[in-house]
Image (spheres, rainbow, N blue to C red):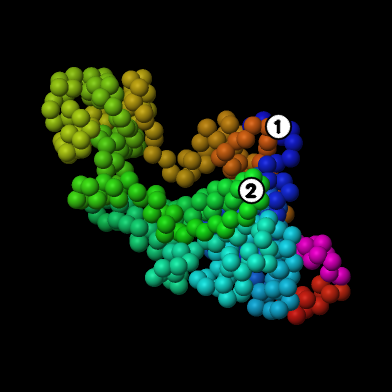
Amino acid sequence: MTDQSGPLPLAGITVISIEQAVAAPFATRQLADLGARVIKVERPEGGDFARRYDTTVHGESSYFVWLNRSKESVTLNLKSDVGLTVLEQLLAEADVFVQNLAPGAAARMGLGAEALADRFPSLIPCSISGYGTSGPWAERKAYDLLVQCQTGLVSLTGNEHGSARVGVSIADIAAGMYAYTGILTALFTRATTGIARAVEVSLFEALAEWVSQPAYYTRHSGAQPPSIGTQHATIAPYGAYTAADGRDVLLTVQNEREWAALCERFLQRPDLVQDERFATTSDRVAHRAELNVLLTARFAELDSQEATQLLEEIGIATAGVNDIEDFLKHPVLEARGRWQDIRIPGGRTIAALLPPVDLSGTTPRMGAVPAAGEHTARILSGLGYASAVIDRLRSAHVI
């Protein structure tokens, strides 16, 4: 990571986000990492419901801490006329507006893309929905696991004993990534053409893109890839095997040169190089059961360290199968300085990962995670509201 030599790339960009859960907060946190001012609009009573998903991080939600650093929090009752007026004032000074409200809610509040374009022609609106803002499922609620099921992802995950959800909120993350890149594209378009384009992303269509490979495979082979745990559905050998010490070691063979090296130096069976059952990747997939018998027997002769060392020596990609505790202590993260302290509500600090993209000459912002409404008074003061008026709004539960 190089030292910061100037302003962050999105310094001067203001983002207003009526956001909750994962998808929209993930998109806007990445904008905040790059220097955008992100004002998070929350409910006066309790704020973003993701604050209450769990209490494991010194009383704060692990989801919320992950997704909301470097943001400002303002509480507004958007069911009140005054709350909507304040939101309009914020939008008048903003560059980007992000929302992942319930289906149809933004349009009912006058916050749809077309309505916003009439009032704020330079504003870039971004809508994150479940199944899109049009079409037969536009009014359906969608949460991550529902979308994993609808895209067929759950049917690909697991093993012969049953399907399983992916262990992270992958549909939300996919949608948040596409919203983030869509907003960056829209900002570039506005800077080069003067035109503010609306951005729309759905969880379903974001994850649909990510399952395109098995979709092509299924459409053109007539059968979907099987669920086979840590094994790869269309490449073999590619998966985890248990060594003599009980630890799993994953290996992958990507080409015929690697297959020959595995046969000759790891399996100690050079005759297998010419075995027609294993001649190509497709052949090895077709004869996976026989291949796994050979690999399982060989791994049973070696402990995990011996197996890993031998595979590395002969140029076969390999890795241990970590749990999360192993990941937290990973030497790559430590050696590359990827952990950095951030502040969370209550004044405590925790270690957070730097964003995965390094930009030469810049250091990403790693600001505090806000308490609900922490910046309300300051933001309203910036809009010209006197302290007495702010007090009255708070008493009336508008903020």
Q: Is residue 272 above or below residue 79?
A: above
State which quarter of the image contains the C terminus: bottom right
Q: Which mark, by number, is residue 3?
A: 1
- Badge 2 or badge 1: first in the primary sequence: 1
Assess whether mark 1 and mark 2 are in contact (beta carbons under 8 angstroms).
no
- Residue 102's x, y, as percent? 52, 70
Q: Label 2 is placed on what type of residue?
A: Thr
Camera-nearest label, 2 or 1? 2
The Cα atoms of the two marked residues, 2 and 1, are separated by 32 Å
Q: Is residue 236 above or below residue 263?
A: below
Disc 1 is placed on an element classified as loop
Q: Is residue 112 above or below residue 228?
A: below
- Residue 70's x, y, as percent? 68, 51
> Would you say 102 lies left or right of 270 here?
right
Residue at coordinates 39% horizontally, 64% vertically from top-left?
A: 146
- Residue 385's x, y, as percent? 84, 69
Disc 2 designates what residue? Answer: 193
Q: Residue furthest left?
A: 276
- Residue 348's x, y, as percent? 69, 52
| Extent of the magenta region | 373-387
State which quarter of the image contains the N terminus: top right
* Visible residue check, residue 349: no
Task: Give neighbour class at mark 2: few <14, some 14-19, many 20+ (Cα, 10 Å).
Answer: few
* Visible residue check, residue 290: yes
Q: Which mark, by number, is residue 50?
A: none
Residue at coordinates 17% horizontally, 27% vertically from top-left?
A: 279
Q: Is residue 246 above or below residue 157?
A: above
Nearest the viewer among 272 and 72 is 72
Residue at coordinates 72% horizontally, 34% vertically from top-left?
A: 4
379 is within the stretch colored magenta: yes
Q: Label 1 is placed on what type of residue?
A: Asp
